Image (cartoon, coloured by chain):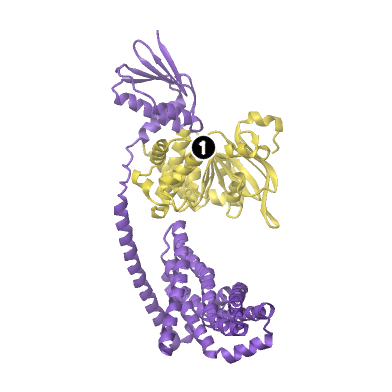
Chain colours: A yellow, B purple
Amino acid sequence: MAINPRAIKTTGYLLEAEGLTVGFGPTNIIENLDIQLKRSEILGVVGPSGTGKSVLMRALIGLLPRRAGRIRYFGRDIDKLSLSARRKVERRWGVLFQHGALFSSLTVKENVQVPMREHMDISQELMDELAELTLSMVGLASNAGRKFPSELSGGMIKRAALARALALNPDILFLDEPTSGLDPVGAAEFDELITSLKETLGLSVFMVTHDLGSLYRACTRIAVLGGRKVMVDGDIDTILAYDDPWVQSYFHGNRAQTVQVQMAEQDKVPV
Amino acid sequence: MATVAIYNGYRLEEGSDALRFKPFGSWIIRNLTEVEKTLANFTMPESSAPVVIDLSDLEKIDVAGAWLIHRSAKKFAAANHPISFESVGRAARILLQEVAESDRPALPPEPVPSKAYTLVEDAGKSVISSAVDLKRLTELIGSMAAIGVSMIRKPSMLRFTPILYHLEQTGVRAIPIVALITFVIGAIVSQQAIYQLRDFGAEQLAVNFVGIVILRELGVLLTAIMVAGRSGSAFTAEVGAMKMREEIDAVRTLALDPIEVIIVPRLTALVIAVPLLTFIGNLSALTAAAMVSFFYGGVPIDLFIEQLRDQVDLINFTRGILKAPFMAIVIGLVAVLEGLQVEGSTDSLGKHTTASVVKSIFLVIVIDGLFVLYYAMVDG
């Protein structure tokens, strides 16, 4: 799928990557891959393990070098930006790493304040208030702010890391396996949190996941990686109808049916 | 007739019936620095006129902006002004709602104890932690001894491969730096000795002094200090990282003894490596001394060797190298003990690695002093 370069300004994609190629040593993990993120959507990226979901995300946020391809954020090619303009773009995204990647020598509150302190010139009082507000928004109790990451449970670490990712009010939120390591209830709560934050804060979310529940509950669009490219993307029905052995077994296997039943039951219960 | 005052980011319109608070522009976190400063200097009007928060001129808003509007509204309300909102857009309404829902009283800041109090507390803590250190050291020595005894009964318990691996890491790979350091120090000491003795025409006697000092003290001391800095820190970091990542707990749950699996091979390797390194260090320092004597003191090499053989007893060498295994044990024990005390944060890893090197170098010097006392009493 080629994109007409002149049409780019009007497409309104927050993020678009064309012909992305990333590899290690002699092999390319992803090759000539195109992917876009629209405003106010939650894009779920799935695929068999080893197809480069995390590699794709790390390449998009500039942690891995590209061998080829162009990436545009907010319609601007990041290779053509000056360093300071690039930093400005980087401040408009927040990243939640798989294991949180909280700074272990700082308290949760200090972790949330790191991006504010480094990039903003606001008073300590306002930073305290905003940190408290963000922690409250991600559902952490007040006393969690004083704790160190090593004193938190897995779910709390994810929430604290999410609070740090949200500290600068980003436009795009990157999530790497946000629900991995959480129990089904915790995972469902986290998906709800992401959905409601997307609504209130107007976020667009790029989510790497292999949690079927998240795909059903949270994602508005799903991209399936396979064969070093995006095999198929679209809403859940498009994916379910797609004829590929992995997609079929993943979305129609026993586990998938259990999730579908759970979803149907949840829909029946009036909230 | 309304009076209008314009500030950074907002306008205040004082009408006859109400005070209009009109934010304008972008109230997003990137632009809020100035707004926050002017808001901080805001003086509340003394009247209790109703306040209308009019968002019609607001272009952009995010959570931080919504928070500042919410906070201003709270301040007006606290000063008994009736509040009403006007022209609130969809995004602003959602954000203001979210902010109001998430607003909660912050925990009061933790009280900061007085300097005198913390001084006393810190002193007490370090006394207690020394006591705990001592207890842990005793425990560790005890379990090492127990393992040692069972290994004598059943030598197959000794893990050969890890010992060889650590022997390479702490021994073979340390040879260049130990040889270099002892060479340089040997040369320096020898030059000084010759320089001082030259006035008496006794350059040859420098050989006695240099030989004894190197063999008894310098060789082993420098080697041990190098090993403490090189391998002691590495052991602490390794064991500490294993502790942080729960690998030590994993070893335990596999019905293995972490002391036997992790600590004994490292310690055994050190006990073998340090005496051998000391021997190499001695040779290197004596070589340097011989070279300096030749080039600087004019003492021929064969005379140097002869003098060394005749005047410096073998007992100097044995007394020096006898200290090496003890120093190795102390370095290894301190390193492992510090590593096992690492907690969750990277901070703590750094602290314990520092403590490990400082403590082991200190203890190495203390041990050297004890040996000097002991030898003095024996000879006495």
| Residue A189 rendering spot, x and y as whole percentages | 41, 44
| Residue B207 rendering spot, x and y as whole percentages | 60, 84
Name which residue lies at 46% across and 74% down. Answer: B365
Name which residue lies at 48% across and 45% down. Answer: A214
Kind of residue sitting beneath label 1? Pro
Displayed quadrant of residue B71: top left
> In terms of depth relative to the viewer, which is nearer, B42 or A271?
B42
> In terms of depth relative to the viewer, which is nearer, A13 or B325?
B325
> Looking at the rendering, in which quadrant would you find the N terminus of chain B?
top left
> Looking at the rendering, in which quadrant would you find the C terminus of chain B?
bottom left
> In terms of depth relative to the viewer, which is nearer, B283 or A13?
B283
| Residue B54 rendering spot, x and y as whole percentages | 42, 19
Q: Residue B152 vs residue B206: left or right?
A: left
Chain letter, disc 1 residue: A
Displayed quadrant of residue B185: bottom right
**Residue A26, placed above or below residue A112:** below
| Residue behind mark 1 | A170
**Residue A87, placed above or below residue B40:** below
